[in-house]
Image: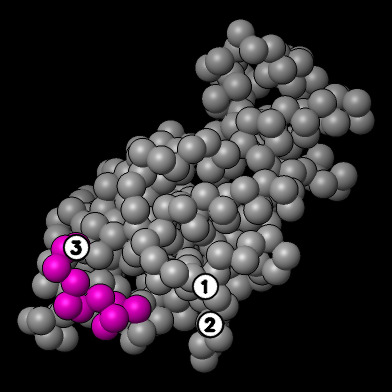
Amino acid sequence: MENKHLQQSEYDQFRTFLEQQCGIVLGDNKLYLVKSRLAPLMARFGVDTLSALVSKTLSPHERQLRAAVVDAMTTNETLWFRDAYPFELLKTKIFPEFNDLRRPIKIWSAASSSGQEPYSIAMAASEHQSKSAGNLKMGVQITGTDISNTMLDMCKNAEYDALALARGLSAERRKKFFKDSGNGMAQVVDPVKKMVNFRHLNLLDSYALMGKFDVIFCRNVLIYFSPDVKAKIISQFAQALNPKGYLFLGASESMAGLSDSFEMIRCNPGIIYQKKQ
């Protein structure tokens, strides 16, 4: 459709804008993604063409539009207990190491999207605690961050429809960790919900106010960044981790050539990275 047409020069300008705002690098072949993500904003902001929308987005005075555009471009679908093994490693390896900790174990989900990852971590913690009264007796504090305020609102509400619940969640966990809230929706139960707090964060910004963590999850996020930005983020993760703390990356992501602050630990299955002392 003509109203969704973008010139190559306009696409290139938009790619530069997006990388500067949030570090995401769009390839030459992602024009279709820009069209599908931004088209719904045209009516919302009273713009007739995608070209005009992009042009307005480039103006520093259009703060509301720019925020909505970044929101649209950074929103990703996710699922419960994605890839399974990180959550099993929490229960079989990492949580047991922290059982005698005299404070709550602190975990950061650095791109929480619609909340499935941090709540899956909380459910894994609950399952570990239920095995023995001595497990993680000081509790678990999970922080979820995201650049999208829309996603953060969804996270805080902790309410999901049948389609979202069907993605990666077993019937047993659905029954144990959710309560029906009407209209086909279900909400995370309070004991799990209370383990998690959410806050807005752009991974390009400073993490100094986040505090220190024992475990950081940043999975399937670094693939969108340039090597320089990846190295910067990993360096900041190292500073945000306590000594011997753990970092989870996505299954297809590697730290090779980006940092010497971590030791790679091969598990069966999966890989995790442990901060050197």
125 relative position to 41: left or right:
left
**Residue at horizontal 66%, vertical 40%?**
23
Helix, strand or loop at label 2? It is strand
- Secondary element type, mark 3: loop
Looking at the image, the residue that sits furthest to the front is 277
Residue that numbered label 1 is attached to: 273
Q: CA distance from mark 3 to mark 1?
A: 21 Å
Q: Secondary structure at mark 1?
A: strand
Residue name at image x 24 percent, y 57 percent: 141
Q: Residue furthest bottom?
A: 268
Return the disc, 3 or 1, that comes first in the chain's sequence: 3
- Single out the residue that lies furthest toward the right: 8
* Circle 3/circle 2 CB separation < 8 Å: no
Q: Which residue is mark 2?
A: 265
Q: Tell me where the magenta segment starts and ends, as one range.
A: 94-104
Q: Residue 165's spot in the image, x, y percent? A: 38, 63
- Is residue 189 or residue 273 the one in the foreground? 273
